Every structure is written in structure tokens, then in C-alpha cells.
Image (cartoon, rainbow, N blue to C red):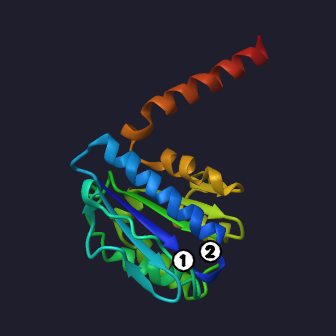
Amino acid sequence: MIVYFLIDTSGSMEGAKIGALNDAMTNILTELRDVGDEQLSVAVLQFSKTVRWMTEKPRPVSSFEWVPLEANGMTAMGQACIELAKCFVDDPVSNKDTIVVLISDGYPTDDFDEGIDTLMSTLSFQSCKRYAVAVEGADISALTRFTGDASSVYSVSNLNDLTSILSDMMPVAVNDTNRVTDDVADKDEDDDEWA
């Protein structure tokens, strides 16, 4: 399994936003390492004026070293989509356990339509799990096109919530207990209302 993170490092992410993002990513990688899944790899693509991979290829989470990101420049989200498309082969089965998380606080400043069309043309991208995190100021319509489902776009109003939001997107092994508890709690509340 591979988890791809596409991270907006444009100028609007400067300050508290990029600081919270760096903290959240450090925490998520620690959580994923604690799971101890040797099959799990991570790749990080940052995009601002240009796009750049943190590592040349996905790395096992056990050896992935987080390099704090800095924010500046524009929001080349379309170019990020084209770069990510290169990672997917047209084999939906081989990528069915792949997770892609897009984090952004802005609007694309390049040709997003071309980028998302290129990415969506790969069947394997269509079959993977896709999420987006909308930090204050994000283009919700672009993030919804990326995920294909508005319910997979998570809005962050408090940057301190970023770690828990990202945790909810990770493989079931990380949050299995929390998800079951949350589901049971929701059912109990509903039952009480109808009692």
C-alpha cells in the first residue's frame, strides 16, 4: 500500500498553516510507523510554483524522513495532478489499496482542468481512495473534483485538528478502534433521541 500526500506549499500557506502542517505530518508518520506495516510506503509531492517530490520514489514508512516544508510561490495544482498521474498504471486492481490525500488552502493558479482530466483518465486513480483537506481559503470545488465526492473533502477551521483529520484518512489499522467507537457512539445518540 502507498499513501500519496499532495501538499500545497504556496505563499498563502506561510506562517501558522505550514507550521501546523509540518507538525501534523510528523505526527501522522509516527502513527503509521507505530502500526509497523512493512508493506506501507509514503510519497510526498509538494506544489507551489513548481512541483517536487520529497523523495525520488515512495519509501517504506519505517525509513521515511520528514523534511519540514516552507511556503512560497503560486499554486500549481494542475501540474501536481499531471505529476501524480505518472505514478499510476492503468491497472485498477494494483492500486485499489492506494490512498491519495490532497491538502490545500488556495485556488489553482495553473491549468487545473488539464491536470485533473489527465489524472482522472487513469483508471487506477479512479479506483484508489481519495481525500482532500481544505484549509481556510481553499477552492472546495477543485478539491471535490479531485476526490470525486464532496464527503471526502474535510474542512479544517482549527489547525490543531489537522492531525486527527489526517489520522481518519489513514489505513484502517491506524484508526480501526476509533472508527468502531465513533460509529457506536453515533448510534447510541440516535437511539436516545428516538427513545
Residue type beneath disc 2: Met
Residue type beneath disc 1: Thr
Q: Residue furthest top?
A: 195
In three-dimensional space, the C-alpha distance between marks 1 and 2, rounded to whole angstroms, equals: 6 Å
Q: Position of residue 40 (x, y in %)?
A: 27, 52
| Dot 2: element | helix
Crowdedness of circle 2 by 10 Å Cα count: few (<14), some, many (20+)?
many
Crowdedness of circle 1 by 10 Å Cα count: few (<14), some, many (20+)?
many
Measuring 64% from the left and 52% from the top, which residue is drawn there? 160
Q: Find out whether the residues at labels 1 and 2 contact each other: C-beta distance under 8 Å.
A: yes
Measuring 65% from the left and 64% from the top, which residue is drawn there? 135
Against 58, residue 85 (above or below) is below
Measuring 66% from the left and 78% from the top, which residue is drawn there? 12
Work out which quarter of the rendered image holds the C terminus and state it.
top right
Measuring 55% from the left and 82% from the top, which residue is drawn there? 112
Which quarter of the figure has residue 2? bottom left
Q: Which residue is the site of mark 1?
A: 9
Q: Looking at this view, is 162 or 4 the one in front?
A: 162
Q: Position of residue 43 (x, y in %)?
A: 34, 66
| Dot 1: element | loop
Against 10, residue 1 (above or below) is above
Q: Which residue is the site of mark 2?
A: 13
Q: Position of residue 107 (x, y in %)?
A: 65, 78
